[in-house]
Each structure stands twice: as C-alpha cells, then as structure tokens.
Amino acid sequence: MKILVTGATGKLGSLIVEELLKLVPSNHVAVSVRDPEKATHLLERGVDVRYGNFNEYDSLVTAFSGVDRLLMISSDDAINRKKQHLTAIRAAQAANVRFIAYTSAPKADVSTVEPFNDHRITEEAIKQSGITYAILRNNWYIENEVNTFQAILNGAPWVIASSQGKAGWAPRMDYAEAAARVLTGSGHENSIYELTGELLTQEELARLFAEVSKRDVQIKYVEAEEYSHMLSEAGIPDAFVSILVHMQLEIGRGALEIESSDLRNLLGRQVTSLKKAVLEILEEMHEDNHK
C-alpha cells in the first residue's frame, strides 16, 4: 500500500509524515511537494519524494500515480484554494486513487464562516468524485495562539474580539496523529470526523495561560470596529483585516463550538491537555528566544 501526503513539508504535513513512519515502513510513504529539495531529509529515510504543484494538473496526476491512499492537506493559498483543490481531486480520479482523506474545517457543510466555503465546495467535490473518502474537520490548533502568547509575555493585554465564543483547541500533533491513523487504519470509508479538543472561551484560555506561565494576564474585550482598527495599526493588510474580524465574530456566534469525541476515538486516548500543550509551546518559545 502506498500512502501519499501533499504539502508534506508544511507544519501539519511534516508531523503527519512522522506519524506515518511510526506506523508503516518508509517505502509505503510518499510525499508530494513543490520543492523536492526541501524533502531531502525524507528521501534519505526511504520516503518516496515526488514533485507536485496544486497549480499544475499534470504534475499531480504524475505525483498521484500508483497511490492507494491520498491525504490532501488543504492549501494555504486563500485566493486560489478552491481551484487548486478541484484540480487535485480531478488528478486523483485520473490517477485512480482509491481513497482520499482531506483536512477540512469545522462544520464545513453548514458553516457561515466565509473562508470555510472553499472547504464545503471541496468536500462536495470529493463526495461526487466517486472516490472513497474520509473528511477530517480539524478545529483550532493551539499553536495558532503563539503570537498572542508572545504578546502577553511582552506585556500586552489578551485582546478578545470573539465575546464568549468557544473553540476546540488541541495541539497540531494530535490532529496529525489522528490523520495518520485514518490513513493506515480500516473502517473509515466515507466518514466525516469533527476533530475537536477542549472547548474553551478565549478568556478561559487566557486564565489557563496565566496559570501555566505564572504571569498576570490582563484581558481586554473589544468590539469589531476597535479590533479592526488594532489590526490595521499592526500593519495587517486591509483584505486580511476584514477576514480576521469576520472570523472572530463567527467564533463569537459558535462557529467552532463543537462537542465531539471523534478526535479522542481516533487517537485511542485522551486529547493532549491544553495545560501540557501550552507548557510545551512556552518551552519551545524560550529555547527559540535563546538561540
């Protein structure tokens, strides 16, 4: 069996490859990357490294050739993502891939979060492709808050624009392990998993961070207009400011508040505690700051 991971040198993809290498021989693992030189370390470990670009259909057909199971990690190119995903699905059909797993977004089929529209369209296209699938709807990575953690350590307040909305934070590693288990396991045919960790509000996460870091954390609630102004003052491009404000408003309305045991069930253990995850992030930040 040949398992291929796209975007394998990215933050999530690299972790998934490492998890796969714990579960299957390296010659069963392939990766599709835009720059094969960045995957030399995988080639040296026996991984099949292939060139594949989501903007080049032919390259994907070649990359997916002989692949039994494909993990399509969602593109981070917000402008071209929908087109890229549809191209990859067509390429998977042409290459006779038998199973696709896709890293999607929470409640993608019904969500009113605008950036999640691409995920909804991608999910629909996968279902219509005729290829057996597993949809992995990843909730929020705790690593998304690293910039906030650093700002707090620098003396800034914890700014909250999502009111009392909750998110299902979990470390990226847990999502990676779950994906690897789906790719190597059985019984996941045509399944949709809502993968979520511990549900907390931003204020609850701030309190947890204060406890772990042993620091006082000042919490500042702001409305959308003030949050937009703050982002602009920080140099965020206007196009992204509107997206970020929209995202916070949707989180406030419950866009990420999903009760599900899917992540725990796929892992076969409890999801990593947020206290442990935050502590590990702080240790990594400390090491990086002293290099």
Image (cartoon, rainbow, N blue to C red):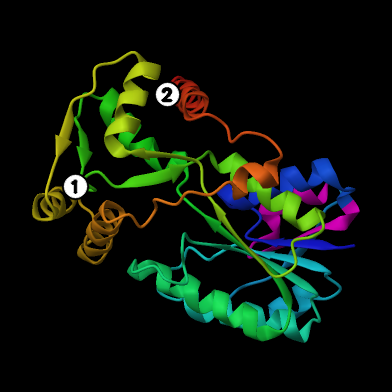
Q: Quadrant of residue 49?
A: bottom right
Mark 1 surroundings: few (<14), some (14-19) or many (≥20) residues within 10 A: few
The magenta region covers 27-44
Q: Position of residue 207 (x, y in %)?
A: 30, 25
Question: Can residue 15 be seen by looking at this rendering?
Answer: no
Q: Which mark is residue 289?
A: 2
Tell me which residue sits at (45%, 74%) in the image. 118
Q: Where is 8 relative to 100, above or below? A: above
Q: Amino acid at mark 2?
A: Asn
Mark 2 surroundings: few (<14), some (14-19) or many (≥20) residues within 10 A: few
- Is 250 in front, or is 156? 250
Count the labels in the image.
Answer: 2
- The residue carrying mark 1 is 234
Q: Position of residue 228 (x, y in %)?
A: 15, 55
Q: Is residue 290 left or right of residue 159?
A: right
Q: Where is 251 relative to 95, above or below? A: above
Of helix, strand and loop, which one carries label 1? loop
Residue 40 painted magenta: yes
